[in-house]
Amino acid sequence: MKILSIETSCDETSVAIVEDGRKILTNRIYSQIDIHKKYGGVVPEIASRNHITKLPYIIEDALEETKMRLEDVDAIGVTNGPGLIGALLVGLSEAKAIAYSLDKPLIGVHHIEGHIAANFLQYPELEPPFLTLVVSGGHSHLVLVEDYQTFKVLGRTIDDAAGEAFDKISRVLGFGYPGGPAIDCAAKKGNPEAIAFPRVFLDKKEYNFSFSGLKSSVLNYINSKKMKNEPIVVNDVAASFQIAVVEVLVKKTIACAKGIHMNKICMAGGVSCNSLLRQMMTDAAKEEGLSLYYPDPILCTDNAAMIGSMAYYNFINGAVSDLSLNGIPGLKIGTR
């Protein structure tokens, strides 16, 4: 089964064709990072306009690469939330038009469930159940994937998401947007033990995250240095901040896996590209005898292949949409 999938939830315009939920035939991605850099973050209206401009051409590119016609695909998958409402509606409008004109099934996909499904593309042997740490610009979740349609959120951020904290601290340090790669790069040149930023673990019996206190601590440190006219070693700040985030993510994830007696852990989302997170999670999983999975970086950031994978499992389990499918910015995981 070949599914043409569309992802336009934020600032990446992406089209993919995925076969049977596990094989990528094409995964075309147009990134708007260079456009939004000058603003220090994503401007929703600009993102939507660029989706409108680029999406038809990216669909053409995907079909040309696979030497397929629209008539050759079996269904249309599309992200319908969460995300920026204007951006979501661009992809949804295109997907509905194609599905209606060709009389093909339309399949709505939850963006976070798509991130989780990226692991199916990387690891064809992977099957539920497993625990997933989802870390991105807007989300920090611990999700128990019981089967292909059952997702149970065991922990989530109660304030800032990890990726959001990376972006804010990056701007303050003068690295700009996007913050994750910039902090990761700078941290490799700094001393992670230079500054003792706090690690917030909350209640040990719960698996929620909180990064607002850490963010405030970093801002206070920087402001204090400026008021005293003392030098700020930005690479040390980046390294000390990064390890404070990563230690919490790793320890919470391992504790959750042990608490629910789960021996398989996946990672997903843009922040899962972070090199220190990958290293420390790998080491911790090995020490505890747990199996760890995470996709290549290109499948961690927003892309349509992950949407096509999840769309396949939605379809074979009867979760097919109709033309009333709408964009829902705050769509909860596990809902359609």
Image: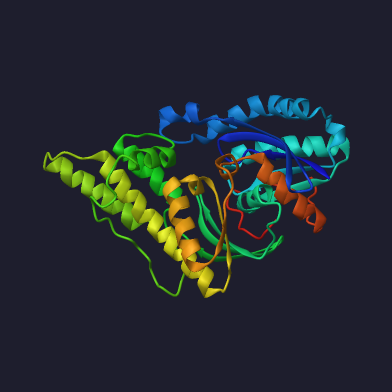
Q: Is 213 located above or below residue 228 in the figure?
A: below
For residue 288, say whether it is visible: yes
In this orientation, which residue lies closer to the viewer: 174 or 288? Answer: 288
Image-based side of 101 in relation to 114, left or right: right
- Image location (x, y in percent) of residue 321: 78, 50
The residue at the far left in this view is 228
Residue name at image x 38 percent, y 66 percent:
201
- Image location (x, y in percent) of residue 283: 45, 58
Residue name at image x 44 percent, y 46 percent:
275
Image-based side of 115 in relation to 127, left or right: left
Residue name at image x 72 percent, y 25 percent:
61
Residue name at image x 27 percent, y 46 percent:
191
Instruction: Tell me the quarter of the picture where residue 96 sits.
Output: top right
Q: Is 13 located above or below residue 125 in the figure?
A: above
Quadrant of the frame with the N terminus = top right
Quadrant of the frame with the C terminus = bottom right
For residue 158, say whether it is visible: no
